[in-house]
């Protein structure tokens, strides 16, 4: 099942399918190893729910939901 | 052998942020580092030397970089340095815990540089977490020298130095796609028994970052730190005051054969001002800095950015601005420089302009002193906490106002790494924060305080200070302050630490402070009401940044207009707030 990465709940993980993010963000994400095919897990959400903490390539990064809406993931 | 001798080789040390580069750098250079300029930038690259007996190796500690094509200003410095080819050899420091990500940068560097050493750091931490690396295979696949180190235990540092000093074979890059190749290499060489984060770490994060408790816990932590600072600073302050009074009496005796103006200039001018700066500054800073470094070392600061990004986002800023505000608590000039981590140029300017709204270490002791004089022992930490929160809120509000003026909404992406919690090295914290930071700040304020003391004494004796205070008095009382307080703010432009000493010297006049140095409490307590104290605290928080910060803003933005804005903006806010407080209270 495919959906937006921003719709994952805490504790869920999925595989990145497509990234329709802006060029700078894509470059930035690449340096974290965040590319299609990689597995991401959601660890936390910020108090107002606008930021999510993701685990990717053994690193935890925080990203905004507005950016995460542009990333499609597939749930196993 | 002297350091002036030309080094044999220049080696650039680079790597992802937070992989322990600087720890390695210090371990190799024995902390003989001095920061040097590079390509017109004020700071960013630290230079150090490794002594190899008959020759030197020059080591450059570049700012942490995620990738050579990253967006931030600090990353651009590192990338430019590598591309310039000034360094004969590069050491890419990798994190053993997340090798795959570190290798992306390593492979990118290998595409540009011919001589690269890959240094896999934090191997002890990886061992503890059940991550094992196949050294031989890694070396084979990378086709370059690989060294395993641990900055904390010192393991492998000698072999890293040997590798840097030795002759590295030149090699051609063959990595077409760094990301895909990094994945392949990491898969082949890393054997993992478990998670990169332990269950305990995940649980702590779930609590610290949780919806309900995240922000209350953060505020509670702030309050606790302030309470410890105020409560703890009380005693050493009293000892220092006693000590300085004894010193004053001794100095008077020594100077008695000299004419009155020599005595006055040295004892009442230079000595008294310096002593006051120290007794106000030193105790709170000596307690606050270690506590703050502790949070820094554990890895809590990025979590603050995570918690505050939502609010910051609504104001057109980003969570990283919260980090620069935290740095501003130490020193606004450092905070302004720290704004380099913000990728969006316009958001960065907004962060620079509002940074001085958090109290730096020059103003923080003033707040602590006023709060403990007028609000008692228990309420004072709450008052200071409210002050800091007010500063942060005003910074956010002003960022919001400024971003309304911005031509277009910029949608710079926000990515922030949340590092694993690390066991803080208490010894290092104490040494760094007490010896280095506190001593550095004291020296700096002494350099300002001694000449300022002399000048103040001359101005007081010539009656200038008094007439200026009288002249400013109507304006001051309109703001709930007084002429003397405004004089204090005007004269503390070189360094905010001078505020209290200027006021004391202006209030008590020349000579009269002399014997009766029962300082702060009586003098201020008898002259001011709590309303004056509140207005003074607000204006301490919100007025022009000190000269050092202004110069830093100019060198960071390169624009006179923005520097002027950084002066006017907080001042205007402060004036308006004081005016409103005076009318309302």
Image: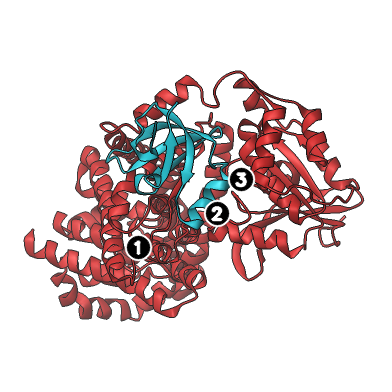
Chain colours: A cyan, B red
Do the residues under discs 1 and 2 have CB atoms within 8 angstroms?
A: no
Which of the 4 image quarters holds residue B574? bottom left
For mark 2, give the secondary structure: helix
Q: Are marks 1 and 2 on the same chain?
A: yes
For mark 1, give the secondary structure: helix
For mark 3, give the secondary structure: loop
Decide: is B41 above or below B208.
below
Q: Is residue B194 left or right of residue B256?
A: right
Foreground pick, B458 / B342: B342
Q: Residue at x 74, y 47 (%)?
A: B175
Which residue is disc 3 drawn over? B16
Q: Which is in the foreground here, disc 1 or disc 2? A: 1
Q: Residue at x 32, y 52 (%)?
A: B312
Q: Which is in the foreground here, disc 1 or disc 3? A: 3
Decide: is B7 above or below A61.
below
* Disc 3/disc 2 C-alpha distance (Å): 28 Å
Q: Earlier in the sequence, mark 1 or mark 3?
A: 3
Which residue is disc 2 drawn over? B440
Question: Residue B564 at x, y = what percent?
Answer: 38, 77
Question: Residue B380 at x, y = what percent?
Answer: 24, 43
Decide: is B22 above or below B513.
above
* Disc 1/disc 2 C-alpha distance (Å): 25 Å
* Disc 1/disc 3 C-alpha distance (Å): 28 Å
């Amino acid at each position: 099942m495919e959906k937006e990465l921003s719709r994952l709940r805490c504790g869920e993980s999925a595989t990145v399918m497509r990234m329709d993010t802006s060029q700078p963000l894509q470059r930035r994400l690449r340096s974290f190893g965040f590319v299609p095919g990689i597995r991401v897990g959601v660890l936390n959400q910020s108090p107002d729910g606008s930021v999510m903490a993701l685990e990717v390539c053994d690193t935890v990064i925080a990203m905004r939901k507005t950016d995460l809406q542009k990333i499609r993931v597939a749930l196993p | 052998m002297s350091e002036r001798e030309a080094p044999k080789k220049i080696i650039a040390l680079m790597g992802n942020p937070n992989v322990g580069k600087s720890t390695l750098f210090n371990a190799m250079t024995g902390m003989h580092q001095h920061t040097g300029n590079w390509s017109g930038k004020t700071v960013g690259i630290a230079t150090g030397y490794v002594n190899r007996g008959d020759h030197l190796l020059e080591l450059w500690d570049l700012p942490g970089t995620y990738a050579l094509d990253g967006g931030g200003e600090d990353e651009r410095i590192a990338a430019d340095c590598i591309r310039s080819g000034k360094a004969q050899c590069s050491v890419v420091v990798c994190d053993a815990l997340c090798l795959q990500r570190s290798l992306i940068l390593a492979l990118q560097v290998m595409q540009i540089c011919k001589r690269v050493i890959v240094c896999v750091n934090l191997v002890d931490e990886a061992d503890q977490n059940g991550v094992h690396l196949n050294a031989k295979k890694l070396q084979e696949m990378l086709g370059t020298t690989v060294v395993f180190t641990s900055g904390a235990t010192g393991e492998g540092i000698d072999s890293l130095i040997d590798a840097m000093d030795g002759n590295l074979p030149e090699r051609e890059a063959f990595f077409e796609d760094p990301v895909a190749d990094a994945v392949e290499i990491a898969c082949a060489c890393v054997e993992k028994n478990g998670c990169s984060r332990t269950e305990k770490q995940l649980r702590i994060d779930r609590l610290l970052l949780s919806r309900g408790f995240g922000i209350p816990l953060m505020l509670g932590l702030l309050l606790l730190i302030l309470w410890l600072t105020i409560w703890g600073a009380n005693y050493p302050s009293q000892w220092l005051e006693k000590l300085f009074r004894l010193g004053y009496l001794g100095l008077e005796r020594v100077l008695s054969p000299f004419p009155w103006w020599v005595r006055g200039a040295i004892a009442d001018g230079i000595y008294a001002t310096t002593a006051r700066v120290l007794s106000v500054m030193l105790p709170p800073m000596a307690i606050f800095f270690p506590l703050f470094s502790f949070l820094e070392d554990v890895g809590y600061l990025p979590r603050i950015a995570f918690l505050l990004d939502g609010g910051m986002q609504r104001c057109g800023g980003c969570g990283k601005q919260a980090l620069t505000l935290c740095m501003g608590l130490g020193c606004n000039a450092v905070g302004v420089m720290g704004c380099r981590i913000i990728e969006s140029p316009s958001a960065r300017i907004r962060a620079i302009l509002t940074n001085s709204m958090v109290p730096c270490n020059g103003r923080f002791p003033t707040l602590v002193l006023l709060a403990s004089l007028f609000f008692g022992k228990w309420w004072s930490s709450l008052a200071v906490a409210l002050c800091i929160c007010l500063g942060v809120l005003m910074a956010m509000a002003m960022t919001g106002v400024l971003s309304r003026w911005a031509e277009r909404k910029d949608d710079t992406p926000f990515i922030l790494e949340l590092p694993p919690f690390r066991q803080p090295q208490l010894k290092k914290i104490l040494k760094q924060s007490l010896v280095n930071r506190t001593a550095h700040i004291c020296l700096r304020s002494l350099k300002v305080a001694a000449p300022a003391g002399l000048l103040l004494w001359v101005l007081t004796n010539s009656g200038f200070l008094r007439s200026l205070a009288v002249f400013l008095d109507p304006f001051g009382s309109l703001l709930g302050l007084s002429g003397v307080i405004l004089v204090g703010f005007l004269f503390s432009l070189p360094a905010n630490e001078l505020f209290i000493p200027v006021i004391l010297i202006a209030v008590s006049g020349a000579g009269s402070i002399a014997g009766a140095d029962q300082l702060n409490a009586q003098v201020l307590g008898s002259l001011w009401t709590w309303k004056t104290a509140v207005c003074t605290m607000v204006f301490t928080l919100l007025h022009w940044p000190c000269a050092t910060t202004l110069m830093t803003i100019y060198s960071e933005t390169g624009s006179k207009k923005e520097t002027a804005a950084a002066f006017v903006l907080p001042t205007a806010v402060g004036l308006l707030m004081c005016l409103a407080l005076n009318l309302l209270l």
